[in-house]
Amino acid sequence: MKRTNYCGVINKTHLGSEQILCGWVHSYRNLGGLLFIDLRDRTGKVQLVCNPENKEAFETAASVRMEYVIEVQGLVSARAEGAVNKNMPTGEVEVVIKNIKVLNTCIALPFEIETDKNISEETRLKYRYLDLRNERMIKNLTLRHKVTQAAREYFSDLGFLEIETPVLTRSTPEGARDYLVPSRVHEGKFYALPQSPQMFKQTLMASGIDRYFQIARCFRDEDLRADRQPEHTQIDMEMSFVTLQDLFNIIEGMVKHIFTTVGEPLETPFLQMQYSDVMEKYGSDKPDLRFGLEIQNLDGVFAKTAFKVFSDILASGGTIRAITAENGAAMARSAIDKLTQLAKDNGAKGLVWVKLKDGKVESSALKFFSEEEINALKAMMKEGDIMFIGSDEPKKCFSFMGALRKELIKTLGLKPSTKWKFLWVKNFPLLEFVPEENRWDAAHNPFTAPVEEDIPLLDTDPGKVMSNQYDLVLNGVELASGSVRNHNRALQEKILALMKHSKEQAALRFGMLLNALECGAPPHGGMGMGLDRITALLCGEDSIKEVIAFPKTTTASCPLTESPNVVDEVQLKELHIKID
RNA sequence: GGAGUCGUGGUGUAGCCCGGUUAACACGCCCGCCUGUCACGCGGGAGACCGCGGGUUCGAAUCCCGUCGACUCCGCCA
């Protein structure tokens, strides 16, 4: 290769040197007797200048158009005082063209690189190879690479082995829908793409691998969101002989290493909270703790209320909760109505608002409140505050108050208190009852171990059993999830039985794992972290599509490759598939 | 499965409410001029039957119905 340097790095230290640069014509300015080209590669841009005295080169330079690929030999020169471009990192220098060669031409493109903003995502994805020429995408993909490398480095240094697990595996119709792959050799049989390497990594623990990690692609055939793609990448990890706190320590170490590597050293501690407390305080299992707005309990205030709405709720075992927002009293009626509607959409029957304005309490339900209640509310508020009160059966109440909290943060345009706020959510219930199916289901992951002292409760009151499950939440995003697993076959089978899996079914679906467990599997645990999500957060992107080179659209299709698509009749026949 | 927003030259938008000229503007593209530009400038030109199908109407980019696609959200996502 003849290239001597990248465009974006050329600076004063290269003055007087001759360079061979290759790249794309980002823009050209032909002044008639003088010609400028901004040459771009993934490191940045540098200005080329061509004088007419260099006749042959000038002729070629005049023929280039947007996005032509050229190779240039030239002298790095200082720009004249007035010609320095302060908006350009390479703006103090320019490269005087000696020779120029067109390596490839380019047709008129659907959009311009960098200058065209607000291109529809549809167009961007259809021409992703052009979109990826943009600085934003180069920056994001570079950062993603760094995150991946940092994770690899961290785990490797701690003695973890990176082991690949199969992508063609078997379907386990738990949780998300599987992507299926028909087998040619076995008529009527299918592989499934893994939703996670869960079973394999636990099996690796049974093998005595002790410490495993993988940058693993996971597949889920579910509807998409800004933070969900049909295939996503997990930093997947599992280790033996660990407690929950060991896992926290290891993962915190990894997160810190990643953040430091990308230039965001962390000082903020990782908080830990019980799932039940998180739900009660924030109405969400992934609250954004950069904002306050805790949900308050008003059961005491209204214990003896004459307001029928509240007294009925309390009598039926419900609860009354509130959120108080500073400087919210100025909120317009329409904004309050919007928030009320949002609460209703999330299951609330209504919301009561209370304002403290000029030392006086105003409220949509003022006439129902006693003097004592008004004073109690007043004592909880500061001048200019607004309080929203909701009441319902506790779980429902927390849920819509949580939705309200999220919306309030948006509506009031609250500024986050810190850049990053980490939260471990732990002590999830192991099981949740599904009334429609008259069975228990894993609250998170069917292989999670119950808290040891709760094991007897599996026989008496399964809903009370706490698990060794945890989530790591960052700025309101569920970043990672993991647990200490069951390493005892009998216990695992007991839990599967509560989920109404017969021994036969369990053996059929999870046989590999169950068999491995009874062959001397060590205690173990681990986690999976969303690589796309952590990268998106670090890039300041709202959608993980911006950190994935070739993502899918909301209908799980790829505009670039036009997948999914039809296949040949011959292919179908080989796979024993008939399409109606 | 459901809700909302959007769809107009290559790209991004205006026009749509309140139907009626050759569908406007910017960038890109083509031609010409220009020796210090950097969103270069100036002059000229090409390029869209307004996502698709149907309906209302003398007449539809505009109103109505359907459909397809994109995005966001709910359901779903162990």
Image (tube, grey):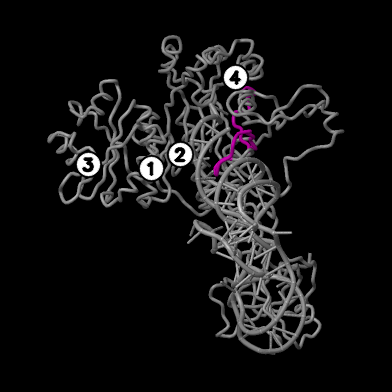
Dot 3: what SS? strand
Tell me which label, 1 or 4, sits earlier in the chain.
Answer: 1
Q: Residues within 10 Å of mark 1 (few under 14, many from 20)?
A: many
Query: Residue type at mark 2?
Result: Val
Report the number of numbered marks.
4
The answer for how far apart the CA atoms under marks 1 and 3 are is: 28 Å
User: Which residue is the site of mark 4?
Assistant: A521
Mark 4 is surrounded, within 10 Å at the Cα level, by few (under 14), some (14 to 19) or many (20 or more) other residues, namely many
Say which label, 2 or 4, has the lower sequence index.
2
Residue placed at 81% from the left, 37% from the top?
A: A567
Q: Which mark is residue A473?
A: 2
Quarter residue B57 falls in: bottom right
Amino acid at the residue labelled 3: Ser
Mark 1 lies on residue: A289
Quadrant occupied by the C terminus of chain A: top right
Up-down: is B65 above or below A520?
A: below
Instruction: Give me the C-alpha separation between circle 1 and circle 4.
Output: 38 Å
Give the label, 1 or 4, closer to the camera. 1
> Are the residues tagged 1 and 4 within 8 Å (C-beta)?
no
Please report the bounds of the magenta region as a residue range: A206-228
